[in-house]
Amino acid sequence: MTTPPAAHPGAPGGQPALTAAQVHHRSTPGRLVLAHPWAAHVALVALVLLLGSVTAAAASETVRGATSLGLFAPGSPAGERFTTAWLAGTAAGAVALVARNRWPLAVTAVLTVLAVLSLALGQVLGVLGFCLAWALHAVAARRSARTAWLTGTAVLLVVSTAVFRWQVVGLAEVLLWSDELPPSDGPVFQRLVEPGFSAGRRSWTALLLLALLVLGGVTGAGARARRLHAHDLAERYAAMARERDASAALARAAERARIAREVHDVVAHSVSVMVALSDGALSALDRAPDASRSALAELSRTGRGALADMRSVLGPLHPDEGAEAGDGPAAPAGTDLVAVVERFRTTGLPLSASGLDTPLPPDAAVRLAVVRIVTEALTNVLRHAPGTPGAAVALRRTASAVEVEVVDAGGTRPGTGSGTRRGIAGVRERAALLGGRAEAGPVDGGGWRVHVVIPVEDPTGGPSGEDRA
């Protein structure tokens, strides 16, 4: 069973963060080194000490072979000096490499100084060239490519100059002289004069150093590129997660605004109509019982319609109940504009209407917006212009737009409250969501006018009514 990654403290939304270590697929040794960084230091120190011991023994055999060729006098301290410098350089280089990851440039400089001192005092480079390759690997892995190239070039020039100036035992000497063995007793079997400076032999060491430095720089640059790639992927994942969470937050805010708008429309409008119906039924209870019963029946229908609308609005909050999740909000029950107008007439509102038989676009959002806008405007008439001598609803349709206009003549009694100021704002929001515009304000001579224009696509592709006029 795979355990999911723990949530990163800075991960957006509390989701598990994708780290660079997860992107960078490592082998078993790589994971071991990542878990125990000291293991890499111990392994490298052991490798340097082992390589230094083996090559020091080869250098000792080289001195013996050179002595048998007569290049060194028997009993010369040269062999002991070479071996001592070789082993001392090995130990110093192994210790310096422990800090290569923390201070790569400083460690490279220290190893360069050790290499020059080993050549100047002991006339051997030993395994310090191998140590310099590891140091340059660390430089290339943690610094820019320009820094790595400049550092490698400087190391190669300085150490190669010291090699050509002081080296006596190097790669060529080990290959050429180590197989000559002196006799067990007696004088040496050859009398050769010790050769002077040999650019050919010393160039072997310089070429080996060049190969080691290039290998160290290339592998370090590759490690840096992989690390940066993994870091970049992790940053992209984090950015995508932040963008996802921001989009989800915006979607949640938009959904909350939609639900608040719908709930306001359903509750405020229906309750206002129900209050007006109940007041009318109460006043007509004795003198006109039939009218009272009609008002109560309409009151009941309004309440049931409001409940149905509330269920359709709040349904997406409980997707497991009824519709499947992801189906989106269901259309409210009351989308019949004629029924809306008749309901307000039942409340006693002197209402005239024109264009109610105008065919609306098939888009459910446009049809719902028209119904909600008319309902909001007429509800405001009931609440803020009671006793108005008249109100008018006009619906017009052109090839490119649907126009809704609700005008009242002003009230003769004080309104029932200051309102929440959400009604007109909701009208403007509905129009803006569909790319339209809404205007609301007083008219000359008293009263209030709400005018909304909602653009629609022309199914015929012809000019609009306004363009034809």
Image: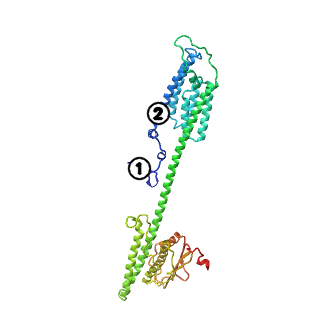
Q: Which mark is residue 172?
A: none
Residue 136 placed where, x, y %? 56, 36
Task: Give 32 or 190, whichever is nearer the viewer.
Answer: 190
Q: CA distance from mark 2 to mark 1?
A: 32 Å
Q: Amino acid at mark 1?
A: Pro
Of all residues, the one furthest to the bottom in this rendering is 287
Task: Give 43 or 275, whichever is nearer the viewer.
Answer: 43
Does residue 174 lie above or below 296 as drawn?
A: above
Residue 95 placed where, x, y %? 50, 31
Image quadrant assignment for residue 203: top right
Does residue 143 lie above or below 372 as drawn?
A: above
Q: Name the N-terminal-most of marks 2 and 1.
A: 1
The residue that appears at 49% across and 31% down in the rendered structure is 47
Does residue 60 lie above or below 418 as drawn?
A: above
| Residue 321 can be seen in this image | yes
The image quadrant where one finds the C terminus is bottom right
Q: Is residue 177 left or right of residue 251?
A: right
Residue 149 placed where, x, y %? 60, 38
Task: Give 243 or 26, whichever is nearer the viewer.
Answer: 26
Does residue 31 lie above or below 381 as drawn?
A: above
| Residue 105 can be seen in this image | no
Residue highlighted by disc 1 = 4
Residue 6 placed where, x, y %? 42, 49
Q: Are marks 2 and 1 in contact (CB under 8 Å)?
A: no
Q: Amino acid at mark 2?
A: Ala
Residue highlighted by disc 2 = 43
Circle 1 Cα neighbour tier, 10 Å, few/some/many (<14 / 14–19 / ≥20):
few
Label 2 sits on a secondary structure element that is helix
